[in-house]
Image (cartoon, coloured by chain):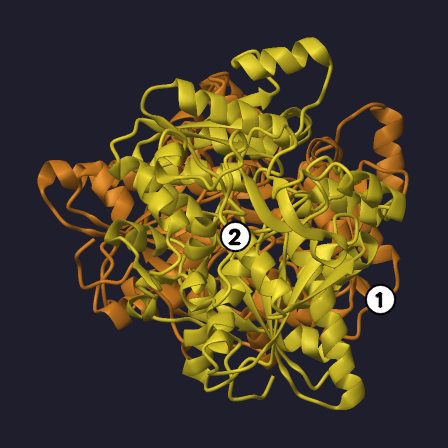
Chain colours: A yellow, B orange
Amino acid sequence: MKDKIPYKTYLSEDEIPTQWYNVRADMKNKPAPLLNPGTLKPLSLEEMNPVFCEELNRMELDNDTKWFDIPQDVLDFYKMFRPSPLTRAYFLERALGTPAHIYYKFEGNNTSGSHKLNSAIAQAYCAKKQGLKGVTTETGAGQWGTALSMACAFLGLDCKVYMVKCSYEQKPFRREVMRTYGANVTPSPSDTTEIGRQILAEHPGTTGSLGCAISEAVEVAIKTPGYRYVLGSVLNQVLIHQTIIGLEVQKALQKIGEKADIIIGCAGGGSNLGGLATPFIGEMLRGEANYRIIAVEPASCPSFTRGKFAYDYCDTGRICPLAKMYTLGSQFIPSASHAGGLRFHGMSPILSQLYHDGLFEARAVEQTSVFEAAELFARTEGILPAPESSHAIRTTIDEALKCKESGESKNIILGLTGTGYFDLKAYEQYNNKTMSDFLPTEEDLAASFAKLPVIK
Amino acid sequence: MKDKIPYKTYLSEDEIPTQWYNVRADMKNKPAPLLNPGTLKPLSLEEMNPVFCEELNRMELDNDTKWFDIPQDVLDFYKMFRPSPLTRAYFLERALGTPAHIYYKFEGNNTSGSHKLNSAIAQAYCAKKQGLKGVTTETGAGQWGTALSMACAFLGLDCKVYMVKCSYEQKPFRREVMRTYGANVTPSPSDTTEIGRQILAEHPGTTGSLGCAISEAVEVAIKTPGYRYVLGSVLNQVLIHQTIIGLEVQKALQKIGEKADIIIGCAGGGSNLGGLATPFIGEMLRGEANYRIIAVEPASCPSFTRGKFAYDYCDTGRICPLAKMYTLGSQFIPSASHAGGLRFHGMSPILSQLYHDGLFEARAVEQTSVFEAAELFARTEGILPAPESSHAIRTTIDEALKCKESGESKNIILGLTGTGYFDLKAYEQYNNKTMSDFLPTEEDLAASFAKLPVIK
């Protein structure tokens, strides 16, 4: 514990970044545009405006503006839970006996328990500014729904959350947090929408899916005057909002006079990894620095490491736009895993293009080894991590052990997206040694790839 | 949001206090000594050593030493979650339209979700230093058990937790957090102890009580070589460890050039209120300052406001020492309430003496009004508070509204002990409008007082 670097580095409030970063402005190869699922032509602002908030759509389509001012009201809200600390993991380093210096950026110090609040307040703010009455969304694991509920409660917006039915039943506590923040939480599929009634008629007793919940939320947004639909990952706008994470890391490193060598983040739809890493990738694109950046995904849902870079639907129901991305196929159903936030078949188009261009590497890890890492982290660093975040912890430990072998004291930056307080069913399974790993076979993937749409 | 005071004030790591404060050194009227339940004579160090850790016993009996050095290893551990921020509740103030300035000291930013970790690591450290193999304890709501599990995992000590059976069954998530930290969690009453087997034989199907869990934990500590029993509240030593809270508040106020007018904390056994308030009470005792300090307790378990100041047993089973304290009687069973941490029939002897001497006031509040305050706090300040902490929030709001009437901009300091992430059954009841209030009748209390021991 004798070192010049403090355990936690906090920025002062006036050091919180006042602009979000848009990596597309620095990308030579821009991500491919979203396509209208009906026409298969690039989506226009006019087509997007009835579904999504206008200002957010402009941000979504903007490949050129490098910096977006963070509105003062959003900055004020950020001060509730930001700046988040950049913590030196002295105790984990000691337990590993590694010469590496591990730093983690902890985004879980708020009631949503994750980084999702960074974008939720930005999106809710735009909805409010547009004069809307409310927003709709879907939630699986529940972190996004909770974050959006908190943001809406703060701004006095109505919030309708369609929660995948099995999650609604298995995670009543998540549901109650959202209700405490005034959200209207409906188990999906429900009889409140046409598509829901249709699915219920065809599959009575279904426990729902994210694809179905998306369809219901979109239908309600379109049909209810004064409502729009919002989404917590994948989209370009979400990555922009989440850059507050990486920008704060950069400032904190500057403050302690250190430089990152390796940056590690978990990747589901890309909101966390994009937010953490794109400010660093920007430096690489501009030729200012070089980093090793590692995306960590579950072996049960390995979009980067085993997926195809192709146009695909963003939802199982094929009613949402198509994106060019690393995908396992929109009909791919990942095996049950406890990292609900990482079970999306596709990946952010921005990150997909950057990965395709070789700006970072990716690694798939198995859930039992992920929980082993989570346990060690909890016992040494005191924070019970979310299953999603623990994927990045697994790889951080692996890299730190490689440093032990080579004797190198690299600076590793770990994105710790959130806490596991609502994931204790998973920990129970791990504690009882009844957790296992299910990986897709080559046949599974081939069958799914065969259903990819053919786009000219 | 335009004010010179930042939203959050953090001390730097080298500003964390390095000593704990013992208010007894400044008290003219010392708290009465604990009595041996067999002899009814003051407990000696020799009688305490087989049950509790030696260094902690010396602290327990020490009425004179004003400052205790915090061991370096404990200070290092504190850096995982301390300093905790002193937050200006700008958004709550705005919602109330009050000229009062509300500050809250948030102790929930750690996996135990409460202030309990401040004392857990101090006690575990002493056990380790004494060369013990492990410690035993009981837990009801689970915050103390979780905190102790975390501290023991960190130091490599074994931790045996007796968890009240109904809580073990109703709060499986709390149980799993403790197991993840390597603790051995047993539902109480159990067949692992003599007293447990006896209770099970007499009351088959009982769901347990804190009194019974204490008895089991003490029995195991006495009978197992290398084990001692530790406790998370009531004791003098616990109040000393918890003064890190109040001492940090004092430093943070100094840093922003402000002075407290009113200090508000919830009180169950006294660990939080004692830790928050005794550094300020010390200033009052030394004639250096004057504050209004308010202890807030549940109307269902009103030790200060309706109890007697008398010698009483600390446990229902009457095997533990007697303390002179404000008590509702050791045979008093408070009605089911969701603030499990505030359901103790007695109160810290130090706080009891200070209250008796008029150093602070007390107020009892009803749980429905407490959850109303919790909901407003969550929606404005973003943190879902623990039911215990929400008692203090209730009174803070009431005082802030009085300031609105009088036009005074007083500085109110609120002790926000923890988060409600594991208390969502309670929030669910509140959200469903099925929560009610049960207050003890005069007859209930009279019957309980009639069973108080008669001590000469």
Q: Chain of mark 1?
A: B
Report the disc number at residue A60.
none
Q: Residue at x 45, y 77 (%)?
A: A286
Left or right for A332, reference B356: right
Q: Quadrant of the C terminus of chain B?
A: top right
Res. B46 image quadrant: bottom right
Q: Residue at x 73, y 52 (%)?
A: A307
Percent coordinates x, y for residue B176 in the rendering:
74, 45
**Compared to B149, does A343 lie above or below?**
above
Tag 1: amino acid? Gly
> Is residue A116 visible to the viewer in this orientation of the structure?
yes
- Residue at 71% over, 41% down: A329
Chain letter for mark 2: A
Q: Nearer the viewer, mark 1 or mark 2?
A: 2
B114 in relation to A105, above or below: above
Q: Which residue is at the front of the view, B181 or B411? A: B181
For label 2, the residue is A32
The residue labelled by disc 1 is B226
In the current view of this chain or complex, which residue is farthest to the left? B407
Residue at (73%, 71%) from the top-left corner? A397
Which amino acid type corresponds to the residue marked 2 in the rendered image? Ala
A413 vs B449: above or below: below
Return the x and y of residue A22 as percentages of the image width and height: 41, 61
Q: Are marks 1 and 2 in contact (CB under 8 Å)?
A: no
- Which quadrant holds residue A240? bottom left
Q: Is residue A156 left or right of residue B365?
A: left
Residue A385 location, x and y as percent? 65, 55
Q: Residue furthest bottom?
A: A407
- Same chain for the residues at labels 1 and 2, yes or no? no
**Relative depth, front residue between B339 and A272:** A272
Q: Secondary structure at mark 2?
A: loop
Mark 1 nearby-residue class (10 Å; few <14, some 14–19, many ≥20): some
